[in-house]
Amino acid sequence: MGVVELFFFFKQKTAYEILSGLVGSEMCIRDRYQRRVHGILIMEITIFILALLAQGIFAEWSEPAQLAMTPGSLTTARDIYIDPSTGIRHIIYVTLNHSLLGYSKLDSNNKVLFKRNFGGDKIFGIENSLIVGSGDGKGLYIVMGGVRWGPKQLRDKYYTESQDGGDTWTPLVKVPRDDLDDDSERDNAKILLIPYSNRIFIFYTRYGGMDTTGHICMVTKPSGSSVLSKEVEIYSGGITRPPVMSAEYTIVNSQAVLHVFYGIYGDENTELHYITSTNNGIHWSKPIRIKAADRFDHGTTFATFADNSNLQLVGGLYHLMTNRLGLAYKKGNNDWKSVSVSDRRVGWKSNYAFNAGITIAGKENNRLMFLLFDESTDDYALNYSVWDLNTMTYKTEKAPTTENYSASGIRLSSYINQDNKIIVSALWGMVKDNVGYLYIATDTRPVSYTHL
């Protein structure tokens, strides 16, 4: 510990800068103390390298831990949430040929503390599902997709919550409330928990039945309420089917700003549009078409992100007609911009939102975004990059695994621990010879990490 404490008095430098300085010092006195300095030089280099390692400047993934295996079935990662107050990882995943949604609670060493399943009795065909938390070690909220048993077998959304850190959960309720029973299908949901107010927002698409027009709808749950609100339609138009929709929030002057992204049919392809609300979804802005460097692929879905620092950054990852990945973003009131995520062509599955994980962490003036997605030419491969949000430039880094199998779902979550380290956890599923595997790995680096 003494070595590390001594190192903290110096300005952080790269290993090259440290070594260059040491070599210069050695050259000044080599004629008189050559042998002695050689020994000192080796010792000081060793000390500094050990100090660098102790600070975690050389970020490295942990060995991926296998969490679940279901023989003869498919195990697909759906979402992961790390509680910043406890470091506990809460994960949800689809298993048993998409008939159940599994939930597991893991400690920082990925030891399973508790697990249970949702669905199975009146619900099957589990699809996109998400989990968020209140950050106090207690509140957890899940929205899950499923198909109702019965002659119609329509896609629906269901909601459950826990107020004791995941040990007990409320009964599943249909979204919207069960008093609205029609022939429409509800798909592609996004759940948001707004800090300070603890208000829940659930956004989703509605289509089918007697209505051929796609809609974006919303229900809310104020803090302290045990009942979801009635369904509110916030957009009606030519939404793509399968639907394209996601939502995020930012905080401006202690007020939540809601951001909703959605795709509509354009000229032989999908256009990505965007609306916002500053009064809890009561009123919405006029739609804005997000301009990008290339046309969006027909039917594309995407992973979205938002940063609540002074950057006020929102954006999303999308699939292009050229079979490549792009990223559109805006900062505050500035115009939308776009950058290329990869110069390589990506596999068809990379256009699904659950196949790209995004998370943001860091201090106010050093915000980093971590992106993990499935990339393929002849073989599948996970691609991992770290972005500097100030410049929107990135560096490709080592991925948590090099196995050449399609990743059936990729999600990221992050927080800053008590040692002032950024902890990024990646969750993904992988299918090998019709056997589903679920993996989790952790990337650890200091908050001051500025390698870009």
Image (cartoon, grey):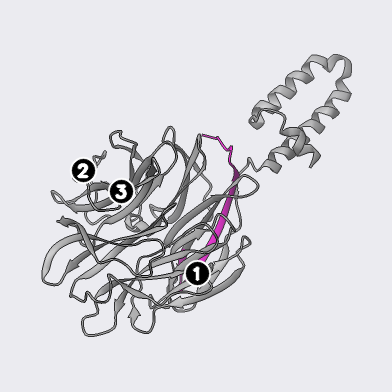
In which quadrant of the rendered view does residue 328 lie? top left
Q: Residues within 10 Å of mark 3 (few under 14, many from 20)?
A: many
Q: Earlier in the sequence, mark 3 or mark 1?
A: 3
Residue topped by disc 1? 437
Which residue was labeled with disc 2? 288
**Dot in front, 3 or 1:** 3
Q: Give the labeled residue for mark 3.
A: 259
> Where in the figure is residue 419, as x and y percent of width and height?
65, 47
Which secondary structure, mark 1?
A: strand
Question: Is residue 149 positioned above or below 223 on the image?
Answer: below
Secondary-structure class at tag 2: strand
Disc on the earlier residue, 2 or 1: 2
50 with respect to 353 (left or right): right
Q: Residue furthest front?
A: 224
* Residue 111 placement: quadrant: bottom right
Q: Quadrant of the N terminus?
A: top right
The numbered mark, 2 or 3, whose residue comes first in the sequence reads 3
Q: Amino acid at mark 3?
A: His
Residue type indicated by callout 2: Ile
Instruction: Please state which of residues 50 and 219 is positioned toward the viewer in this rendering.
Output: 219
Q: Secondary structure at mark 3?
A: strand
Query: Does 446 lie within the magenta span?
Result: yes
What segment is highlighted magenta in the picture?
A: 429-452
Near mark 2 (Cα within 10 A), the count class, few <14, some 14-19 or many ≥20, is few
Nearest the camera: 349 or 149?
149
What residue type is disc 1 on?
A: Tyr
